[in-house]
């Protein structure tokens, strides 16, 4: 296998990993959503606190997020870019969630997502995540209504 | 050179790149701050808009940021993690800015930073940046006073 084929294969594997997580979120399938998350993941989430450390903290956060929605979650990944080396990779995209919270609040929100990966024993794992919305410096509010 | 030595060398090069940018920000040295930024960089910034595309947009943004402070900028990078492969790498950290804006407002703020790199012609370039603060879902405000 040439290096270029190897790179294309690694990109395809990460693309598949992302697609799996998208479907898992839509189905609120916690086990599948966490399947590619490394135990030592360091996560920067859209909401407080500053960071989460370890897959168990992330699992609890994902569970709470899934539970906050009525029914399935509308989830979309757009403008995805994947940069893959032999055993280190990162990706970024704009993600959108659409749905109704259990308290009836309608959500339709875009955020920025960056993910870091390492290949461990031949398998790509997510070792870092950064999800956020920017804020408006004029009023200090998070910008929850921006659209790409 | 063994693979492990190569990896250590790549990590050291990225560490040096980050240190250079920290010093450049402190000195408000725009050219040095932009020296390792790739032309195609896609940047997610702490404040609006959703994204910046290309090094020229980032240069203008950095210039405006530098100009908004009186005198030098206090800048610190903490809990830095670097994951480096042969030609792809990413890093993340908590960054702090301390200073006084031209309007007299005192700033002391931590944010989360993730950076993606590619080695091009033997030299590491920043091709992606994601900087953010989380927000408080109870009041929709960006959390500008969190501390690690």
Image: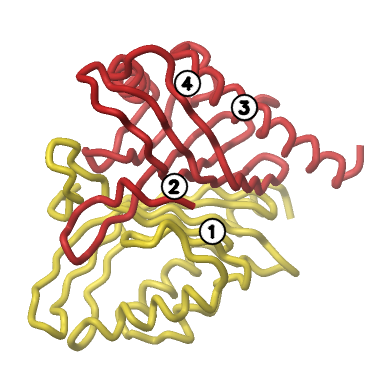
Chain colours: A red, B yellow
Q: Which residue is mark 4?
A: A25
Q: Which residue is mark 3?
A: A19
Q: In the figure, B133 relative to A139: above or below? A: above
Near-viewer residue (B128 or B15): B128
Which of the two discs, 3 and 1, sits closer to the camera?
Answer: 3
Q: What chain is tagged by disc 4?
A: A
Dot 4 or dot 2: first in sequence order is: 4
- The crowding category of the residue bearing disc 4, from other C-alpha atoms within 10 Å (few below 14, some 14 to 19, many at least 20), is many
Q: Secondary structure at mark 2?
A: strand
Residue B71 x, y percent position in the rendering: 20, 88
Residue at the image position 32 percent from the left and 40 percent from the top: A46
Q: In the figure, B41 relative to A44: above or below? A: below
For the image shown, how many numbered marks are present on the structure? Answer: 4
Residue at the image position 45 percent from the left and 66 percent from the top: B18
Asked if badge 1 and badge 4 are on a common chain, one would say no
Dot 4 or dot 3: first in sequence order is: 3
């Amino acid at each position: 296998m040439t290096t270029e084929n190897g790179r294309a294969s690694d990109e395809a594997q990460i693309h598949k990993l992302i697609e799996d997580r998208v479907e898992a979120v839509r189905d609120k399938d916690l086990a599948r959503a966490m399947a590619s998350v490394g135990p030592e993941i360091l996560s920067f989430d859209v909401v407080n606190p500053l960071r989460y450390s370890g897959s168990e903290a992330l699992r609890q956060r994902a569970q709470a997020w899934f539970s906050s929605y009525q029914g399935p979650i509308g989830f979309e990944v757009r403008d995805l870019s994947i940069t893959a080396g032999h055993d280190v990779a990162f990706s970024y995209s704009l993600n959108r969630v659409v749905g109704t919270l259990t308290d009836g609040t309608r959500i339709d929100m875009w955020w920025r997502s960056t993910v870091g990966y390492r290949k461990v024993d031949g398998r790509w794992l997510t070792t870092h995540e950064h999800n956020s919305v920017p804020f408006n410096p004029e009023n200090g509010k998070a910008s929850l209504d921006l659209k790409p």
